[in-house]
Amino acid sequence: MPHDLTDFITGMPKAELHVHIEGCLEPRMLLQFAERNGVDLPYQDEDEVLAAQDYGEPALDNFLKYHENCLRVLKTGQDFYELAYAYFRKCAENNVVYLEIMFETQAHVSRGLVFSEFFGAINQARKEARRDFKVEANWIMSFQRDHSAESSMEILDMAVPFKDEIIAVGLDNYEVNNFALKFVEVFRRAREEGYRLTSHCDCNQQNSIEHIRQCLELLQVERIDHGLHVIDSPELTTIVRERQIPLTMCPTWRPSDPAPRRMESIRKMLELGLLVSVNSDDPEEFASRYMNNIFIEMHKQGSYTKDEIVRLTRNAFSSAWISEDSRSHYLEELEKYAAA
Ligand code: HPA
Ligand code: ZN
């Protein structure tokens, strides 16, 4: 029986770089917001919500349909504020001290919500979390790949007054073919405006390797969200290693399949010297739940050692879009903790 790492993992200072704020909506809040906003949901109670999280295949599409249906309950600034503040409390409970969090844009604006209202609300929660929980966070503004490039340009206009509060832009949602080509101008403008750049390249999608290549070459992304298939291509592996492009893997899936997946692939990424981290993605919609649980399950079910878990955490801090002073501070805290 290997040494149990639960206490070590729980106390370890952690970072999370791939999480969607909308995926942090607890079933309890989902039902409560639906009720107060008069939104019809096909679920009567929390058990029915959890039963609906049995996505099946095609995985990404089925998940996104569920996710989009739930999003509809988010209407007012108060909803977004409560969602984000509750999530930051969870981060503090998990000793997650630094985060980069994605928020969706077209998904809300296309429903008639006002950018300054929903972004203002989550950003207020971010500031309060720093004060109340000592949790630091930065925002990644996600464009939904199934929406048009023009609508992404409009979102960039809406975000101008908040530019200093948003660290990066990203792409998520359905992995439509040649999506990188579609967003070249959007990413060129975002880069000129000073945003850092990332994109999802999801697992087991059509043309995965080509999409990673296009994101690197056409969009000049500095990070890839997921990026599992990098290791299927020796050429991409070399590029990603040489440029130290972070890969933000998310090892869990639907709650009915709770074991973390791709344990050997993530181990291989570490062995290849790739800057891989592990993350929750959508903690209330996936089996990930929160960061402590992910590492505990990786230890118990994937035999991940203390060294490997510290290494994944070191990679997360090394991947973060923060000043070198902050990075040194976080890494020193981690090394001190790991050595004690
Ligand atoms: N992939 C694509 N879109 C998403 C995801 C994801 O993992 N989570 C929320 N939106
Ligand atoms: Zn994601």
Image: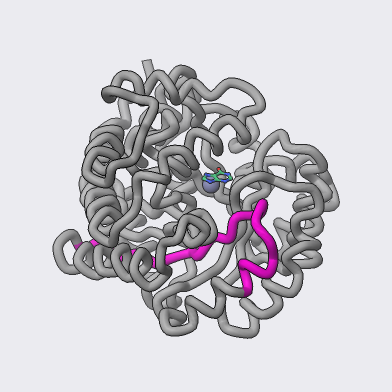
| Ligand 1 quadrant in view | top right
**Is residue 217 shown left or right of residue 303?**
right
Task: Give left or right: position of 91 versus 151.
Answer: left
Q: Is residue 331 above or below residue 29?
A: below
Seen at 39% across and 26% down, the residue is 42
**Residue 112 location in percent, x, y?**
45, 60
From the top left corner, tell me how far across and down residue 304 is, in percent.
47, 31
Picture residue at 33% right of the left edge, 40% below the top: 39
Range of residues picked out in magenta: 134-153
Looking at the image, the residue that sits furthest to the top is: 1
Residue 146 highlighted magenta (yes or no) = yes
Q: Position of residue 44 (x, y in %)?
A: 29, 23
Name above or below for residue 273 compared with residue 298: below
- Is residue 222 in the magenta section? no
Would residue 215 appear left or right of 174 to someone viewing this image? right
Residue located at (67% from left, 37% from top): 203
Q: Dividing the picture into quarters, in which one does residue 335 lie?
A: bottom left
Specify the color scheme.
one colour
For this rendering, which residue is in front, 49 or 298?
A: 49
Q: In the picture shown, does residue 112 fall above or below 271? A: below
267 or 178: nearer the eye? 178
Q: For this view, does 189 lie left or right of residue 83?
A: right
| Along the line of sight, the residue nearer the viewer: 1 or 183 | 183
Q: Note whether residue 337 is visible.
A: no
Q: Position of residue 275 (x, y in %)?
A: 59, 54
Where is residue 151, by image quadrant? bottom right
Q: Is residue 233 visible?
A: yes
Q: Single out the residue that lies furthest toward the left.
A: 132
Image quadrant where one finds the N terminus? top left
What is the quadrant of residue 249 in the picture? top right
Tally of marks: 0
**x 64%, y 66%: residue:** 222
